[in-house]
Amino acid sequence: MAMHGYGVAKNMECIKNSKGIMIMQHSYQWLSLLSATLFAAICLAGCASAPPTEAPMAGQISKQPFGKTKEGTPVELFTLRNSKGAEARISNYGGLVISLKVPDRDGKLGDVVLGYDNLDGYLKASP
């Protein structure tokens, strides 16, 4: 694509206004330029106004064996807990969510996942 004039590609139709300044003829070119400029301005403004990063919320991650696949590959169960007591138990066998304990309206933790408590249940009855 050859360039000419003010660095505008030949296939972009430009015209000169009454003062002899090159301007873009098609409205979609203006729209593209305007949207790119607005996107850049929003990104820069967002970076400038972002609050300082805070220390991560205290939580815990633990790992325990969950079983073995038919091929003998060990499967692990990762337990993630936050400071308020919510807990997620996730296996590395397809990212299965084994358990998710969250508080109800009274603050009592309850498991909201319907599934098996051991790997054998998933190996036998998984789709």
Image (spheres, grey):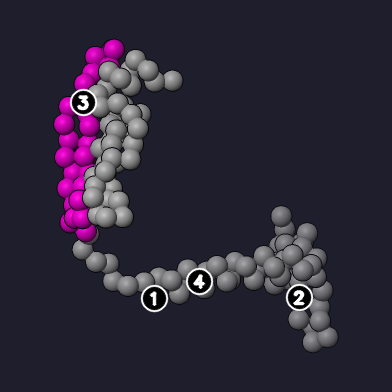
Q: CA distance from mark 1 to mark 4?
A: 10 Å
- Position of residue 25 measured from the top left corner of the image (x, y, whole percent): 80, 70
**If the image is split into quadrants, where does the N terminus sit?**
bottom right
Amino acid type at mark 4: Ile
Check contact, mark 2 vs mark 3: CB within 8 A: no
Residue interval drawn in magenta:
57-86
**Quadrant position of the C terminus in the picture:** top left
At label 3, counting other C-alpha atoms closer than 10 Å, the crowd grade (few under 14, some 14-19, many 20 or more) is: some
Q: Mark 1 vs mark 3: give the one in front.
A: 3
Instruction: Pinpoint residue 119: horizontal percent, then vertical percent.
Output: 27, 22
Q: Residue at x 33, y 40 (%)?
A: 112
Give neighbour class at mark 1: few <14, some 14-19, many 20+ (Cα, 10 Å). few
| Amino acid type, residue under disc 3 in the picture | Phe
Q: Which residue is mark 4?
A: 42
Q: Is residue 122 visible?
A: yes
Q: Earlier in the sequence, mark 1 or mark 2?
A: 2
Query: Which secondary structure class fits the magenta region best?
Result: strand
Q: Nearer the viewer, mark 4 or mark 2?
A: 4
Amino acid beneath label 1: Ser
Q: Of the numbered discs in the image, which one, if any, rests on residue 38?
A: none
Instruction: Compare marks 1 and 3 and give the one earlier in the sequence.
Output: 1
Q: Is residue 2 left or right of residue 77?
A: right
Instruction: Kindly state the secondary structure of the residue where label 2 is placed.
Output: strand
Q: Check disc 4 and report its element: helix, strand or loop.
A: helix
Residue 87 drawn in magenta: no
Q: Mark 1 or mark 2: which is in front?
A: 1
Q: Which residue is mark 1?
A: 49
Q: CA distance from mark 1 to mark 3?
A: 45 Å
